Amino acid sequence: MQRTGNLAGRVGRWSARHRRAAVLGWLTFVLAALAVSALVPQGELTGTEQSLGAPAEAERILDENGWEEPAAEMVLVQRDADVPEAAVTAALTDLVATLRAVPEAVDVASPLDGSPLVSEDGRSALVTLDIAGDAETADERLAPITAAVTAVADRHDDVRVEQFGDTTADVAIGETLDEDFQRAELLSIPITLAVLLLTFGALVAAVLPLVFALTAFVGALGMLSLTSQIWHVDESAQIVMLLIGLAVGVDYSLFYLKREREERAKGAGPVDALDIAAATSGRSVLISGITVVVAMAGMFLTGFSVFTGMASATILVVAISVVGSLTVLPAMMAWLGDRVEKGRLPFARRRTGASPGRFWSALLGVVLRRPLVAALVAGAALTALAVPALTMDLRNESVSDLPQDLAVIQTYNRIEEAFPGGPSPAEVVVEAPDVDAPEVQAAIADLRERALASGQMNEPIDVATNEAGTVAVVSVPLVGDGEEQASRDALATLADDLVPATVGAVDGVTAVVGGDTAESVAFDELMAERTPLVFGFVLVLAFVLLLISFRSVTIAVTAIVLNLLSVAAAYGALVLVFQQGVGADLIGLDRTGGIVNWIPLFLFVILFGLSMDYHVFILGRIREGHDRGLSTRTAIARGITSSAGVVTSAAVIMVFVFLTFVTLSMTSMKQVGLGLAIAVLLDATVVRAVLVPAVMQLLGEANWYLPRWLRWLPELRHSDAAPEAVPAPRIPAAVDEVPVLVRD
């Protein structure tokens, strides 16, 4: 047989020849990664790293001055309209006395002390307090406070007595999200195994890709402990790594294994079949993986630590999956040989992928007979689905994205309604040599007076200072819900007019405005500036990679255009569901609203990379046939039909894995999951089965157009390792009868 000339083929053959070294090397790497993850804690994002613009400057000032934010809590005491005011007073009196008797509760304040903590309608009052000790461990001292509040609520059942605070919310939400993520993990693995069983019809063949993907994830998780010391990550990185890693790891091994099984079914011997799989599917995996990594790397250009951490995590799991696909996977296949068919399901026919299904053959026949009609219909359908994306409304992630059936979230909503802006106010950070100086205090008082007079800000306006007296934080509730335009207008008034005219006008004083609304505005400004840069980076590098891989300007351009079309359609579907409410009940969506502002960019880089899986695999099969001398039409037909089964299986796995996101409680995770699932589904069906063959049929020989001035590009042939299969007897199933596939 002609020897493989590309890198994937050479690596695959080496791994098959040295399969013991390849397998032991992989196991050593995974075990070492486990040890690293146990010994080296992941570097987590700090508050400053999660902030941008003025809020980041505010965080920096607080950090440099040793500001220790106390773990603040609040208790809502609320009566219905038909309940006398005396009932609230009695509950407040009892609550304050009970809390002050709890050692863990300090700085208890209430309307009984003259604090402006009563709503405009007089039916709601707040009691504020701090949890004693370090805020980082406040959850350990929360229970006595919660028990005290519950006891008061039980003694005053004629009024509502409910607790809310960052610590209370973190505990309740954390428990819910942990359950969500565990459910997603438990769902994704059996779903993947079920699809693989249906694909191969044999237990060993189904388990191999799943085990490989999980070991690649474990290896990436250990490496993340090291890279996160440079690029810090947040708590969502691991779940994204698992689901992305599971999707690409299974897909890569599926492409490899199906091609090897296909060649064996054609009659190729074990050496030839594995060589062909290494040089063709292995090469497609390498190109696809590099494209995914390039797309993910675009997130580094945002300059936002949350994105850079997510980029490093996803790049790790994809890169390790690619390396494993080219090394340990062919080694395992060489060791197993035809024993990969062991554990065959009694009801399953032998599935090799050597022949296309009737549906795909029939559909392809129609498309190739009427390519213009097929392209216009499919293109129009995707364009129509993409049109709603033009009305996409971006918003910051907020409490509305959290599970609304949680008691703590319902309490938050009641506080927000009674005290607009109270739970999440703007924060004016004032730095001065002495914030207790008369001129600074006068300026803060002036700021408070002007803020209330503006009609855009509300009580309670609180002031807190550090022990050194160098920093004061003025909490100013804004009108609106923090996201709507009224809140942003109020923020602009505060930051651009009131602060510069008051505390900002005092000599030696630095004053900046932070808070959730300011964070949202700063993020929107960053995305407006960096998104075109990220898109351009990903598109240009993807074009160059495809150009080098296929030596065709036409293929590179059409692949990018079709990928953009499927991404745009996914955006439109998100708008239909999450803004317009189409099918919202089907995914357990409590309310409609805008799209969370970080999701479009995140989806773009993920989808653009993942969709290349199918394009590279299919185009590789088509180019392979063309390089053998087949006509363009025949190469298209053979390439599409021969890849139909494996691409369908890979897409089904990805779609179901991503749909597990939709089962999570957070709206942002539902948006990510649905966006990924829809885009992959469209890409693997409408784009792959209709648009790709239709467009390539229309273009004919123009598909392979390469200008003369680019003919210096290296020629990476797709067929130098894939001659027509030579029939060979099937190898024995016994362990000691399996031959060495390649010898020196």
Image (cartoon, rainbow, N blue to C red):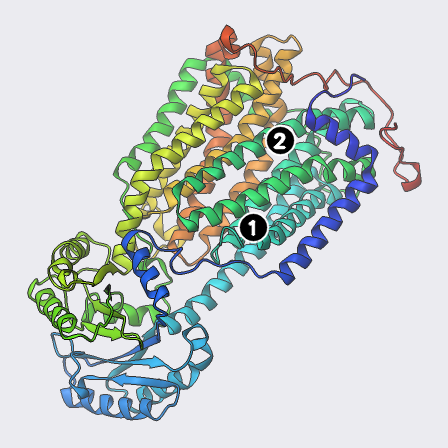
**Quadrant of residue 719 in the image?**
top right
Residue type of the residue flagged with mark 1: Thr
The nearer-to-camera label among 2 and 1 is 1
Q: Are marks 2 and 1 in contact (CB under 8 Å)?
A: no
| 107 relative position to 268: left or right | left
- Mark 2 surroundings: few (<14), some (14-19) or many (≥20) residues within 10 A: many
| 237 relative position to 529: left or right | right
Which residue position holds label 2?
286
Which residue position holds label 1?
227
Residue type of the residue flagged with mark 2: Leu
237 to 573, vertically: above or below: below
Give residue 332's mark: none
Observer able to see residue 154: yes
Residue at point 38%, 29% (across, down) = 382
Q: Position of residue 576 (x, y in %)?
A: 32, 42
Q: Secondary structure at mark 1?
A: helix
| 23 relative position to 106: left or right | right
Q: Quadrant of the C terminus?
A: top right
Q: Quadrant of the N terminus?
A: top right
Q: Position of residue 584 (x, y in %)?
A: 35, 50
- Mark 1 surroundings: few (<14), some (14-19) or many (≥20) residues within 10 A: some
Observer able to see residue 361: no
370 to 673, vertically: above or below: above
Residue at point 37%, 69% (across, down) = 406
Q: Position of residue 370 (x, y in %)?
A: 45, 13
307 to 739, vertically: above or below: below
Q: Position of residue 723 (x, y in %)?
A: 74, 16
The residues bearing labels 2 and 1 have C-alpha atoms spaced at a distance of: 23 Å
Q: Secondary structure at mark 2?
A: helix
Q: Closer to the camera, 160 or 517?
A: 517
